[in-house]
Amino acid sequence: MKSELEKLIALQKTDTNIRKLKKAIETAEQRRASIEQEFEQHASSIREIQATRDKAQTGRADLERQIAENKTYLERADRNLKGSQNQKEYETAMRETDALQKQISAFETQVLERMTEIEDVEKILAERSEEIESLEANRKKALKEFDKELTANRQEFEAETAKRHEVFITLPPQMASIYNRLAQRSRDGIAVAEVTGGSCSACFMKLRPQMQVELKTSNKIITCESCTRILYIAPEPESKAVSQDV
C-alpha cells in the first residue's frame, strides 16, 4: 500500500476517533445529569417515605410543645381553682381546667397516632435499608466510572490531536488540502473510505469491477465516482491470506 495512502488512512482513523472523543467530552454534563436523574427516579419513592417520616416527626414535636404549654396553663388553672374566693371564680377555673385537660388528652392521642405512623414508616425504611444503601453505592460507583472515563477521553483526545498533527504535516500540501476539503464537506468528517463488499463504505455505491482491480494494483489515489471520497481496500490479515494459500 502506498505510503501517502497509508498516511491518509491513519489520518482518517485518527480524525474519526477525535470526533467521537470530542462529542463524548462536549456531552459529558448532559450524560452525567442523565445518570443522576436515573438514580433519582429510583430513589424518589424512598424519598417520599422519608419525607412522610420527617413530617410525622415534626408534627409530633409540635404537638408535644403544645402539650407542655397547656400543662403550664393547667397548673395555673389549678392554682386559680384552689384559690377561688367565690362561686363565679370557682366555676371559671373549673371550666378552664376541664377545657385544658380535654385539649391535652386530644393532643396526647394525636402524639400516639404520630408515633405509630413514625414506627410504621421506620419499619418500611428498615426493610428497604439494603436497597437504599445499594442504590447510593451504585450511584457513586456509576459517577466514579463516568468521571474516570471522561478523564481518559480528555487524555486520549489530547494524544490523538498531537498524533494527527504529526501525520498531517508529513502530507504533501496538495494532498493535505484535498483531504481537508473532503473532510469539511462531509457531515461525518469522512474523507477516506474503505471499500467493503465491493462498495464505498461512505456512500454505499457499488464500484465498477475495473475500479476494484485498480484499487488493488494501481499506485494512484482513486476516488469514489459517487461521493468523491478517497478509496482504499484494506489488506487481508496475514493469517487469512496464509490459510487461503494452503
Image (cartoon, helix red, strand yellow):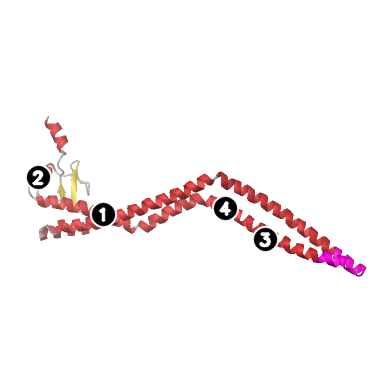
Identity of the residue drawn at 40% across and 52% down? 143
Residue 227 visible in the snapshot = no
Q: From the image, state whether disc 3 or disc 1 is nearer to you.
A: 3
Identity of the residue drawn at 9% across and 45% down? 214
Q: From the image, state whether disc 3 or disc 2 is nearer to you.
A: 3
Q: Position of residue 98 (x, y in %)?
A: 83, 60
Q: Compute the Cα span from label 4 to label 1.
A: 43 Å
Q: From the image, state whether disc 2 or disc 1 is nearer to you.
A: 1
- Amino acid at pointer 4: Gln
Whether residue 61 is situated above or below residue 130 in the rendered picture: below
- The residue stretch that appears in magenta: 76-94
Residue extending furthest toward the top: 246
Which label was assigned to residue 156?
1
Mark toward the start of the polypeptide (4 vs 2): 4
Q: Compute the Cα span from label 4 to label 2.
A: 72 Å
Element on which disc 1 rests: helix
Q: From the image, state whether disc 4 or disc 3 is nearer to you.
A: 3
Which label was assigned to residue 62?
3
Q: Compute the Cα span from label 2 to label 1.
A: 36 Å
Q: Compute the Cα span from label 4 to label 3.
A: 18 Å
Q: How crowded is the residue under tag 1: few (<14 C-alpha within 10 Å), some, or many (20+)?
A: some
**Residue annotated with mark 4:** 50
Whether residue 124 is situated above or below residue 87 in the rendered picture: above
Identity of the residue drawn at 75% across and 56% down? 106
Mark toward the start of the polypeptide (3 vs 1): 3
- Callout 3 touching callout 1 (CB < 8 Å): no
**Residue annotated with mark 2:** 214
72 sits to left or right of 196 = right
Tally of marks: 4
Quadrant placement of the C terminus: top left
Front residue of 176 and 106 = 106
Q: Position of residue 240 (x, y in %)?
A: 16, 35
